[in-house]
Image: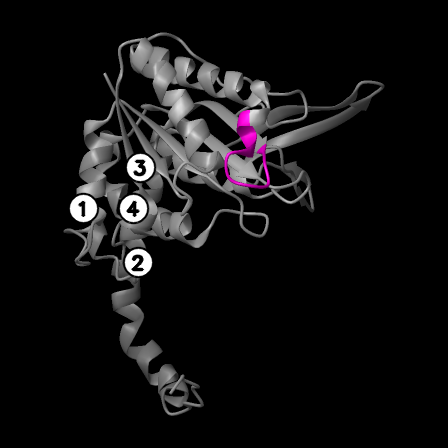
Amino acid sequence: MKVLALVASHRRDGNTEILVKEALMRAEELGASCEIIRLTELKLAPCKACYACLFTECKLEDDGEWLIGKLKEADALLIGTPTYLLTVPGQLKLFFDRILSIYPRLSWTMGKPAAAIATAGIPGWEALVLPSVLAFLYGVGYRVVGKLLAYGRGPGEVLLDSRYMEEARRLGEKLAKAAMGEEVELEKESWECPVCGCSLVKLTQNGAECPVCGSELRLELSDRGYRVSCTGGGRFSEEKLAEHLEWLRGTVVEYMELRERIEELRARYRSYTPYAKPR
């Protein structure tokens, strides 16, 4: 049983990496073989949206395919990230975009357990970080079994709060047990999406939906606060992910049929070039 952890922090043994290591140490106690990859030390090229990966393979020459191979080998995945301006840092977003080339190979990740650890300096400035990680994990087929949000300003400050360390150990235990085949479900608060655990709500003309999994939601207010229930929808089932892959491939075919006309219309913009570049 192998648990792979991806750390998106530049700080070695900072708050994020400490919590990830604490989770992995507990997983090792249960028999897991653990490995950490620091994303900040990899060469990952930006996705160019060429769609080659939908039909053959990604054309970028970087560490992306090596990393996808690591995802294939692992029985479970843990992502650790700090918060930059309410959301994930650039290196993790770069990873999300680059690893989308695994989409035609979702059998490599489908149904595998995963978990997320996020850190932030202060409550109220982390709103998008966990939803961003959840969107990636569900989007490439993982089954999320745990999540942790911890606060700490300076490197290592989380060590002063035993609750965070205990939560990290508990998360590592859940991840290891799920990788061994035990039934482990993601614990959700009453105000979170009952399908994916996202704490955000997207208001629509017809009501509300989860911005991550797309489930239709009903919000009810009681004397104990909000309670969220699911009334339908959703986009991350294995069937719907397969449908989305076919839709993506279909858009390429349809575009090629329209390309000649589109190129004629684009000509006006090709000649307009007020670009600015550094010296």
Q: Is residue 128 left or right of residue 145?
A: right
The structure's colour scheme is: one colour
Disc 3 to disc 1, C-alpha distance: 21 Å
Corner quadrant of residue 1: top left
Residue 99 numbered mark, or none: 4
Give the residue number, with chain letter if any, for mark 2: 47
In the rendering, at what x and y percent does residue 168 appear? 48, 21
* Residue at (42, 86) in percent of width and height: 275
| Secondary element at image label 4 | helix
- Residue furthest right in the image: 223
Q: Earlier in the sequence, mark 3 or mark 4?
A: 4
| Secondary element at image label 2 | loop
Residue 65 numbered mark, or none: 1
Is 37 magenta? The answer is no
Asked if residue 45 shows in the view, the reply is yes
Badge 2: how crowded within 10 Å, few (<14), some, or many (20+)?
A: some
Number of numbered labels in the structure image: 4
Stretch of the chain drawn in magenta: 151-159
Give the residue number, with chain letter if any, for mark 3: 242
Front residue of 110 and 60: 60
